[in-house]
Image (tube, helix red, strand yellow):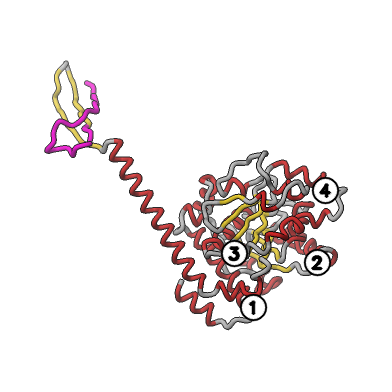
Amino acid sequence: MRRMFRLEQSPLASKSTPGEYCVQSSISYSGQNHCRESRSIPSPRMFRLEHSTTFAHQSNVVHNILTLLRSAYRIMLPEALAPRQSMGRVIAVANQKGGVGKTTTAINLAASFAAAEVNTLLIDCDPQSNATSGLGLLKDPERVSTYHLLLGAAEAEEALATTELEQLWLIPSHKNLIGANLELVEVDRREYRLRDAIAPLRERFQYIVLDCPPALDLLTLNALVAADSVLIPMQAEYFALEGISELMDTVERIRAALNPELGIEGVVLTMLDERTNLAQQVMAELRNYFGDKVCAATIPRNIRLAEAPSHGKPALMYDPRSKGAESYIRLAKELLGRHLAAAGEPPSASTEMDKTA
């Protein structure tokens, strides 16, 4: 006994829609067919049509969510950025401990700012170039990158690359950047190379986000000297507490010698599972030390955040309804609210925004 399958164009117009195929199956024993059944499946043309319809629907979902975000942000954005119309705010995302979500935070925070119709620039300062590939750009050694900026071989305008988000630009990186740590050792004003390079761009972008490498080296030093503030992503673990004390020591040294205006933008907990006692204890320790600098918005573990870079998209574009995307939207909203409060605006604007959102 054997069962045979055959794919053929359906001859039965009454039982199969035009353009469909029938799967004909029969059970054969001793050369005779004892049973016969058929079922129709969509043709490749119909499958492509359905796939295109689904993709268009997903694109409409992304467009609608971005529209809602923009309308919500627009209430507070002009006032929040008013004191800095002629000078963009530079935020370094830094932590010398690896694997804490620095690049994920830099990409998705910058994307959330851009979704609010704010001209935003993301600068990849890490030789691993993960922020570059995470926004869909290939790691091309011939492209003008952060390496060329630090060595004075190109102007910042030459390095700008566009992304899928209309108001998000990127200055990419490449593994050649690792050589800058050695090549800059004997250079004058080596700590100010990035600061000087991006100075012409601060009038063009309201926010410039710097993705720092997981080390307290010359690249991170350049980023912290160029920044107005540092955003510290960290996991709710004991070793993370040890690492943050070293980072704060570096920040104090930079304030004393190189950049007295450097502030703490905030501490954001990433890959967080609030159900564990350890997470609660670490959060309590951070609040005791940093006070209101600990961001209320936290980033949970989320598979969509992990999947998005492999598609060259921020989570906001990959799956705007995921918990990860929503968390970074809340983080961007919180930071904008702080800047609004620093500008001396009444809290009613923020309240109105919450109602609209």
352 in the magenta segment: no
Task: Name the image quarter holding residue 356.
Answer: bottom left
Q: Which residue is mark 2?
A: 255
Reply above or below: 29 against 264: above
Q: CA distance from mark 2 to mark 3?
A: 35 Å
Q: Quadrant of the N terminus?
A: top left
Q: Residue under circle 3?
A: 277
Q: Is residue 352 above or below residue 159?
A: below
Q: Amino acid at mark 2?
A: Arg
Residue 130 percent across, percent down from the top left: 62, 47
Q: Which residues are magenta?
A: 1-22
Residue type marked 3: Asn
**Residue 40 placement: quadrant:** top left
Mark nearest the camera among 4 and 2 is: 4
Identity, as a three-letter code, of the amino acid under mark 1: Ala
| Sooner in the amino-acid sequence: mark 3 or mark 1 | 3
- Give the foreground label among 2 and 3: 2
Mark seen at residue 328: none
Q: Dots 4 and 1: beta carbons under 8 Å?
A: no
Q: Is residue 357 left or right of residue 90?
A: left
| Residue position marked by numbered label 1 in the rendering | 343
Which residue type carries mark 4? Leu
**Outermost residue toward the left?**
14
**Residue 184, label in figure:** 4
The Cα–Cα distance between marks 1 and 2, rounded to whole angstroms, is 23 Å
Helix, strand or loop status at disc 4 = loop
